[in-house]
Image: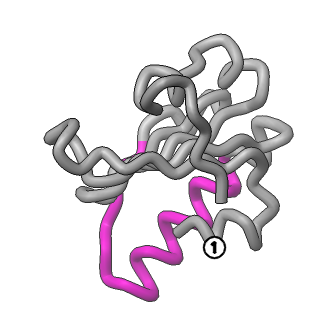
Amino acid sequence: MVGFLEEEKAEELVQIDLRGRSQIADYMVVCSGRSTRQVTALAEKLSDTLKQDFGRFSKMEGKAQGDWVLLDTGDVVVHIFRPEVREFYQLEKMWLPGGTAELD
């Protein structure tokens, strides 16, 4: 999933291990797209790839606005933001221990 997002030019990728910390998922991936169009395209392409290549269906929220799209694949939750929206919410700071960054 991270490799796919890197190939598709997602920016500032952060992968967070949630195992033992949350029941919502095992991992969280946070990344940015440069525009609403790129955020939406990343989400659609990732959802389609997961479905076609792995038979995994994902729930998607926020696609209509394109500021912040959430994909829930079951054990991995992916957040794709426009940079300004990501900066405002600072989601990864809530989940990363002690302000560390886990960049791939």
Q: Given the current orientation, which residue lies at the most extreme right position?
A: 34
Label 1 Cα crowd, 10 Å radius (few <14 / some 14-19 / many 20+) = few
Which corner quadrant of the image does residue 52 belong to?
Answer: bottom left
- The vertical placement of 99 against 74, above or below, is above
What x and y, as percent, mark residue 81?
65, 34
Q: Is residue 41 magenta?
A: yes
Quadrant into which the C terminus falls: bottom right
Q: Between residues 91 and 104, which one lies in front from this camera angle?
A: 104
- The vertical placement of 89 against 4, above or below, is above
**Does the magenta stretch mainly form a helix, a strand or a loop?**
helix
Instruction: Determine whether the residue tagged by mark 1 lies in a helix, strand or loop.
Output: helix
What stretch of residues is rendered in magenta? 40-60
What x and y, as percent, mark residue 48?
51, 72
Residue that appears at 31% across and 74% down = 56
Q: Which residue is mark 1?
A: 3
Q: Is residue 20 magenta?
A: no
What x and y, as percent, mark residue 46?
55, 65
- Horizontal side of residue 59 vs 52, given as left or right: left
Residue that appears at 59% across and 31% down = 68
Q: Between residues 10 and 47, which one lies in front from this camera angle?
A: 10
Residue that appears at 63% across and 73% down = 3
Residue that appears at 40% across and 76% down = 51
- Horizontal side of residue 3 vs 28, given as left or right: right
What x and y, as percent, mark residue 77?
38, 48
Say how the picture is coloured: one colour
Q: Given the current orientation, which residue lies at the most extreme top position?
A: 88
For badge 1, the amino acid type reads: Gly
Q: Between residues 27 and 51, which one lies in front from this camera angle?
A: 27
- The vertical placement of 76 against 1, above or below, is above
Q: Given the current orientation, which residue lies at the most extreme bottom position?
A: 53
